[in-house]
Image (cartoon, rainbow, N blue to C red):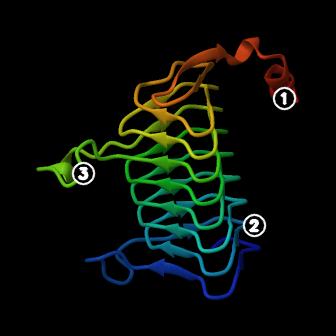
């Protein structure tokens, strides 16, 4: 446990995953962390500095989480996930195992990532593949991203979209299925925000 860590009421830190015994896997939580009430962080996570959760967050085992990461209320982070520095995950987000969120990516509320192409199918556990969100990409509210999709650098996915294919860098997509509607470099208001 790092320095200056605040843990709210009714939190559990180091919950053992199924089949793991006490002290078999190490849990690391960095400096200046705030874990709000009723959150559960399983054993085996490596979490950087300046981390914070909302209330009722669940973080399963064996994840790598960088510095300056925020995970909103009622979000669920499954296991074997990589979350790089400066990532913001809003409330009620579901991120399944084997997903990757690269630095400064942003995930809006109620977003659902998926990782099983054929849920309950034969050998499904051997073929799980979560989405990859590239650096500074932004995912709008209520988006669903299908297994293994890659959202390119600084891409922007509009609210309510269903992402069925990879999204190129700097591309703005929206709809079901999501399709290109613009390039972020051509949007004046977005360009202003990026330079701040």
Describe residue 7's horizontal placement relative to residue 134 as left or right. right
Q: Earlier in the sequence, mark 1 or mark 3?
A: 3
Closer to the camera in the image, 78 or 164: 164
Q: Position of residue 118 (x, y in %)?
A: 22, 45
Q: Is the N terminus in the top left, top right, bottom left or bottom right quadrant?
A: bottom right
Which residue is disc 2 drawn over? Answer: 32
Furthest residue to the top?
186
Q: Position of residue 13 (x, y in %)?
A: 54, 79
Q: Are marks 1 and 2 in contact (CB under 8 Å)?
A: no
Q: Residue at x 66, y 61 (%)?
A: 72
Query: What secondary structure is found at the residue carrying circle 2?
Result: loop
Image depth: mark 1 or mark 3 in front: 3
Q: Residue at x 55, y 49 (%)?
A: 111
Give the vertical position of 13 relative to 95 (above or below): below
Measured in 3D between alpha carbons, the distance from the residue under mark 1 to the one under mark 2, in whole angstroms, is 28 Å
Measured in 3D between alpha carbons, the distance from the residue under mark 3 to the one under mark 2, in whole angstroms, is 39 Å
Q: Residue at x 67, y 80 (%)?
A: 37
* Occupied quadrant, residue 117: top left
Furthest residue to the left?
122
Query: What secondary structure is found at the residue carrying circle 3?
Result: loop
Furthest residue to the bottom?
10
Give the vertical position of 194 relative to 41 (above or below): above
Q: Is the C terminus in the top left, top right, bottom left or bottom right quadrant?
A: top right
Measured in 3D between alpha carbons, the distance from the residue under mark 1 to the one under mark 3, in whole angstroms, is 39 Å
Q: Position of residue 176 (x, y in %)?
A: 48, 31
Q: Residues within 10 Å of mark 2 (few under 14, many from 20)?
A: some
Which residue is disc 1 drawn over? Answer: 193
Closer to the camera in the image, 27 or 105: 105
Query: What secondary structure is found at the residue carrying circle 1?
Result: helix
Q: Position of residue 158 (x, y in %)?
A: 62, 32
Which residue is disc 3 drawn over? Answer: 119
């Amino acid at each position: 446990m790092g320095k200056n860590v605040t843990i709210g009421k009714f939190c559990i830190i180091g919950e053992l995953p199924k089949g793991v015994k006490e002290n078999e896997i190490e849990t690391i939580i960095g400096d200046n962390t705030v874990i709000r009430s009723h959150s559960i962080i399983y054993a085996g996570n490596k979490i950087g500095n300046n981390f914070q959760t909302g209330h009722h967050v669940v973080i399963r085992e064996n994840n790598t989480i960088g510095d300056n990461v925020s995970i909103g209320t009622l979000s669920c982070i499954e296991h074997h996930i990589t979350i790089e520095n400066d990532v913001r995950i809003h409330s009620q987000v579901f991120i399944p195992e084997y997903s990757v969120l690269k630095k400064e990516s942003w995930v809006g509320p109620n977003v659902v990532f998926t990782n099983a192409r054929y849920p309950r199918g034969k050998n499904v556990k051997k073929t799980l593949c979560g989405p990859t969100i590239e650096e500074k990409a932004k995912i709008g509210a209520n988006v669903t991203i299908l297994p293994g999709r890659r959202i390119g650098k600084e891409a922007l996915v509009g609210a309510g979209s269903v992402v069925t294919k990879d999204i190129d860098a700097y591309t703005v997509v929206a709809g079901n299925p999501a399709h290109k509607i613009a390039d972020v470099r051509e949007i004046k208001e977005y360009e202003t925000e990026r330079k701040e």
